[in-house]
Amino acid sequence: MSSKSSRAKAVARTAGSATLAVAALAAITSAAGQRTPHVEPVALASTIEQATHPAAAPTTPAHAAAIAAAAPAPAPMPAPQVLPPAPVVPVPAPAPAPSYPNTLDGWIHQAMDVMAARGIPGSYDGIYRNVLRESSGNPQAINLYDSNAAAGIPSKGLLQVIDPTFQAYHVEGTSWDIYDPVANIAAACNYAAHRYGSMDNVNSAY
């Protein structure tokens, strides 16, 4: 049975009892020869209203705390999204600088690398062949007996270059020392490229 139905029955019983009480009071008063007191219907209505709608109990701090505790807790805030760190791309190490032996073979290869970077032609065989003819592979060789020597500008180094030619055809990135084997080869090949097309085309004194 619902609470509303129970309450309605209780109200009905209360109203019936009140009606019987009023009737009984009227009968007794009439028998005694007294006037029946007037019963205000408002009082009866008030009694029925209170029975139908009982006043709400006052809210106490403890009651308020219980209501607050029973209320659902607010949903927690979502945690901030943490992005994974960007992958670290390893930077390749620079290629090590080439190493050349301090020999005729190493000098020629180093000079050829310098020449290739600047577009100066010349093969290993062409350079090697002319070095053997001009200085026998001695970077300190100097000719003190030819016409250049007589003019005060002797031929020097692996490819017997005179100072004016060395200075005019010096290749950037090499030493300014005419006896430096790499600088001597590079300058001589640069001169030969301008005059003969390449050191490969030189087969005698030049």
Image (cartoon, grey):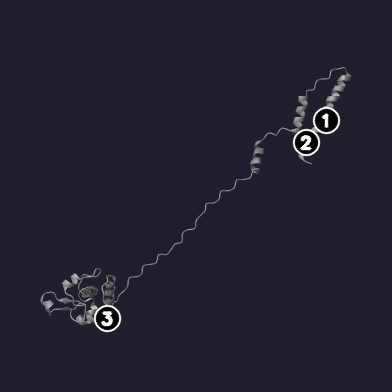
Tags 3 and 1 touching, CB below 8 Å: no
Locate residue 56: give its quadrant. top right
Q: Which residue is mark 2?
A: 7
Locate residue 73: give its quadrant. top right
Locate residue 121: give its quadrant. bottom left
- In 3D space, how far apart are the residues under numbered discs 2 and 3 (Cα atoms)? 123 Å
Where residue 144 sits in the image (x, y, percent)?
Answer: 13, 79
Crowd around label 3: few <14 · some 14–19 · many ≥20 (10 Å): few
Q: Residue at x 66, y 35 (%)?
A: 60
Q: Residue at x 81, y 30 (%)?
A: 15
Q: Residue at x 66, y 40 (%)?
A: 67
In this rendering, would 44 be left or right of 75?
A: right
Crowd around label 1: few <14 · some 14–19 · many ≥20 (10 Å): few
Label 1: which secondary element: helix
Label 2: which secondary element: helix
Q: Nearer the viewer, mark 2 or mark 3?
A: 3
Q: Which residue is mark 1?
A: 16
Q: Which residue is mark 3?
A: 125
Q: Amino acid at mark 2?
A: Arg
- Residue 184 versus residue 67 in the image, above or below: below
Where residue 45 sits in the image (x, y, percent)?
Answer: 76, 27
- In 3D space, how far apart are the residues under numbered discs 3 and 1 (Cα atoms)? 137 Å
Q: Amino acid at mark 3?
A: Asp
Query: Which mark sits nearer the N-terminus, 2 or 3?
Result: 2
- In 3D space, how far apart are the residues under numbered discs 1 and 2 (Cα atoms)? 14 Å
- Quadrant containing the N terminus is top right
